Image: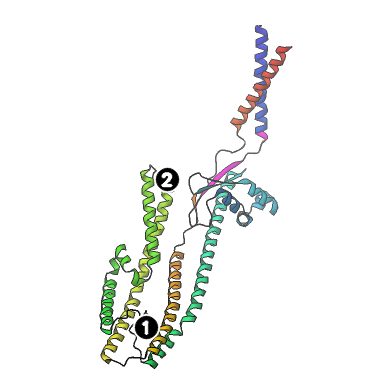
Amino acid sequence: MTSSFARHLTLLFLCILAGVLLAAVITWQMPTRYASSATLQFRPQGSASGNPGTNQEIILQTDILRPVIENLGLEKKWRTDAAETLSRLRSGLEVRDVRHTTLVQLTMEDPDPELAAEIANAVATEFQRQALALQQEAVAKGLEQLKNEIETQKQETEDWPARLKAIRIEGGIIDLDPEGTSENSPSLEQALAEQKETVAALRALQERSMTMTHEEILAALTTAGIDGVLEKTLAARTQLSAEETRLRDSGLASHHPTIRSLQAQREVQDARLQNLVSILKNSLPAELQTAEERLQALEALAAAGPLPEPSRETRVRYEAAKNRYLASKALVAAAEKKLREERAMATLIQQPVVIWEQAEPSDHSRSPRPDLNLLLGGVLGGLAGLLLVLVSLRK
């Protein structure tokens, strides 16, 4: 009994040893491969969606990989033709999203650890470059289209002031506000007093514009004509700050990717606010000059004395023509305002894709894994040994 047990135990041990040796031989013959990963962050306004499937399809496109192959000379390094090089590069790349973040990890696997890291960084850089180029191209096309629309509308509007002036001269019409509506038109004395107040307010605003707070800027929006984009920017910044505070209160640390992303977006909004404040300050001299010229015209009318009242037919014809002019001018003003807003945003285009972390050469191989292979070989050898022991016991 003791001799039989010793024989069976020896058989089991020999099978385990044989499995380990076989696994060692196979592992030694397998090519060593290393993996290096670069991490990308997709920002909300970026062209990429943050969807891992979509990102993988975009990153593995030939338009992204071909420049990497050419820049790194992979055909020479791998000694392969163009098609085989592209296939090998695509099969060596792995793209996966980092859960609950806007981060995507790009991993390259290759027998050379230095080359694996170099390829991962090159693909990340090329993808970042093309994402920014696509966003800039889209913005430029939108601005050009809007500019063309404005030019077309201006052509329809530019003849109206001369036509209105001719009607006023012909009919003896005095219009205290030729660029505004005639409903509830003030008297000459009222218009003169209001214009003096406007000029005084603009002068005071210009003097203190260098030290204006956001609240004071909001009070001057009507004069500056940039209320839409400024209000949206202030609202966006407030929302980002509130979200950051909420996440911090929930326990997220300052170095958490979501917190850092919110901070980066808030910095962009701060830069936009500074740019818009600069636009406001630069527009004040022109606004003041226009107001002063109108004040001088009103003072000249007041000094000329009363004029005869125009006929009702002439007044109706003038009002109809003026309403058409004002409607056309309003369309131009709205389009120009939108163009200013878009240009202000375009000067602060944010990189849609940020390289969050560069790839570094790995010191440990991804495959083969000697420890796992030897363990697996020992387990399989042990199972084979147990099977042989059971067979011998049945004999």
> Relative to the observer, which residue lies in front, 354 or 177?
177
Q: Is residue 90 above or below residue 222?
A: above
Image quarter where the N terminus lies is: top right
Residue 29 forms part of the magenta stretch: yes
Amino acid carrying label 1: it is Pro
Query: Which residue is at the far right?
Result: 395
Quadrant in the picture for residue 275:
bottom left
Expressed as whole percent of the image width and height from the top left, the position of residue 126 reads 56, 56
Instruction: Quickly name the residue at label 1.
Output: 178
Nearer to us: label 2 or label 1 = 1
**Position of residue 131 in the picture relative to residue 395 (left or right):** left
Residue 79 forms part of the magenta stretch: no
Residue at image location 56% in from the left, 55% down from the top? 127
Instruction: Quickly name the residue at label 2.
Output: 256
For numbered disc 1, what is the local secondary structure?
loop
Expressed as whole percent of the image width and height from the top left, the position of residue 22 reads 68, 27
- Chain-order first, disc 2 or disc 1: 1
Residue at image location 49% in from the left, 77% down from the top? 153
Task: Give the extent of the magenta segment.
Answer: 28-44
The local crowd at label 2, few if under 14, some if 14 to 19, many if 20 or more residues have their Cα within 10 Å, is: few
